[in-house]
Image: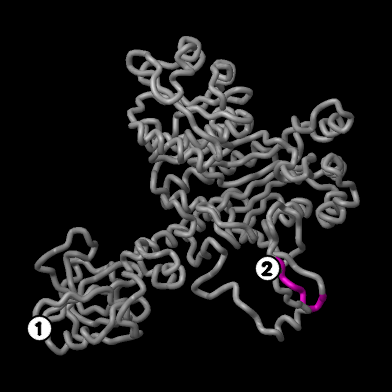
Amino acid sequence: MMQSRTHTCNELRMEHVGQQVKLVGWMENVREVGSELAFVILRDFYGTTQIVVEDAETLKLVKSINKESTLSVEGTVRERDSKNPKLPTGDIEVVPSKIEVLGRCRYNELPFPINRSREADEAARLKYRYLDLRSPEVKNNIVLRCNVVSALRQAMTDHGFLEITTPILTASSPEGARDYLVPARNHPGKFYALPQAPQQFKQLLMAAGFDRYFQIAPCFRDEDARADRSPGEFYQLDMEMAFASQEDVFAVMEDVLPPVFARFGKYHVASSAPFRRIPYLEAMETYGTDKPDLRIDLTAVDATEVLAGCGFGPFEGNTVKAVPVTGFTATRKQIDKLCADVEVQSGEKCYWFRLDEQGEVVGGIAKFVQPIKEQVVSALGLEPGTFVGLTAGKKGAAQKAAGVLIKQLPALAPQHMDKERYEFCWITDFPMYEIGEESGELEFCHNPFSMPKGQLEVLLQAERGEIDPLTITADQYDLVCNGVELSSGAVRNHDPEIMIKAFELVRLGEEDVKAKFPAMYNAFCYGAPPHAGIAPGVDRMVMLLAGEDSIREIIPFPMNKNAQDLMMDAPSPVTQKQLDELHIALVEPEE
């Protein structure tokens, strides 16, 4: 017996024929056949059962009930005359002796059909998310999320990690995104911040002597939404290991993730250990991105030397990248759309030509390539019947445009993508520093807590001018799956002397480090172990496993693209009394 029922709506089979049962659930649909016959579909969390009404009195009751009302149905199980092999309960039906309304739906019209809620406008789905979640398709994504989180927890525990929760109210920290601030009522003018990540706390746990830490950590960042990023909050499998190297982190993740992806994924093939490792500069040169989708077998080739002097204006003085594609049969209209899509997504134009089956250069910029055909064919290793997509610009721009082109091409040449699998890779050796676009000065490229390769010595060489600081790489790595960045991680900078020197190169001294990261700096001064970690995004993992294009499809109660909760009407105004208690005065923004 379960709750106020004998069985769920997905449980009854032929062996239950003749039994008296009690079901509860939502009235999904009613199909009338004549004046005394109707078929009612009752749905609960587990599935559906057909209820057959065969008398006028019960039919009158059913007709008075709106769809999506919750019912209790008592009756007898019998074999169906017309079976439905598509349903687990399709061999039976229940003849009711009693129907009771438990929760009446008071609206004749629903905002959208429950079973087709995904076809509805997104704003309506978010406003009535509790109805959207009744849809089996939507519900199954949330069930998947629960199962994945449970499996990740078990795997981490099996690997000797302790689940430790870290604070939600903490200090503001410069970690790259905007903080969500919380006013401190008892400390006028001061604010807590919601953590962008448990970064400092998990490193402090390492300094405190905990050997292996993890948690399914909520993180809060005031940033814009994307298809693979939810605004406001998200969750990550946060982990850290003491006395550990990059190899130790890789070994754990390569053991934990493939079984989860193979078990729960839409595709049941996942990379096995060891994952392919690609240095950052190689990834940009070969794939045009630091998030390569290795299911695609296309790569970019540097064509600068052979094409920069061909007389085509956009190539002159620029880096030229070529993406050769064999077996490409797209029409001119499709190619034009491909080039337009690349330009929209990358901001750079895309060019092309073909080597036809007779080995002649045709289409696109063929007239510029024809005079140097032999050199181009040799340099790019072309064979007859090959399409060549081209991008040009400053090196980084040409690379990124080529990366966009590579991701777009399988839509027109599907033979170059083995779609139904999960391909992992590590991107390693990220630059430690970069020149800031706004400041024009040296800045940290990614995580300032990462250990530079070469540690103190390489920083001293940069300080003395013996090497360019832009050539310093960090013990930092990204985990990528099917072109989606799941996580960034690093071997941490646990030595105060190295930390200070790393910050001095970006014009911040010891006092700045102490002021910005007082707890971590002081803790490291008491003897911290070398440590390393990573934090794969749970939301992105589940999105990949479910085969969804939008991260909102796998979050129980997501916000919209403007970081608004349409269901709860958040963010919302507060009373003047609340503002006064928090010592906050509102200032109208200037027009």
Residue 581 at x, y = what percent? 75, 83
Q: Which mark is residue 357?
A: none
Q: Are marks 2 and 1 in contact (CB under 8 Å)?
A: no
Q: Is residue 25 visible?
A: no
- Compared with 31, 104 (above or below) is below
Label 1 sits on residue: 35
Residue 136 at x, y = what percent? 34, 64
Residue 214 at x, y = what percent? 63, 54
Q: Is residue 429 left or right of residue 32?
A: right
Judged by its main secondary structure, the magenta piece is loop
Label 2, label 1: how far apart the Cα atoms are: 65 Å
- Towards the viewer: 113 or 83: 113
Badge 1 element: loop
Badge 2 element: loop
Q: Is residue 229 left or right of residue 460?
A: left
Quadrant in the picture for the N terminus: bottom left
Q: Which mark is residue 591?
A: 2
Instruction: Tell me if mark 1 has few (under 14), some (14-19) or many (20+) residues whose alpha carbon lies within 10 angstroms of its own.
Output: few
Q: Which residue is at 56% across, 57% downward?
A: 225
The magenta stretch spans which residues?
181-188
Q: Residue furthest top?
A: 374
Q: Which residue is at 56% across, 22% downward?
A: 302
Residue 345 among magenta residues: no
Mark in front: 2 vs 1: 2
Q: Is residue 344 left or right of residue 41?
A: right
Tell which circle, 2 or 1, labels the residue nearer the N-terminal end: 1
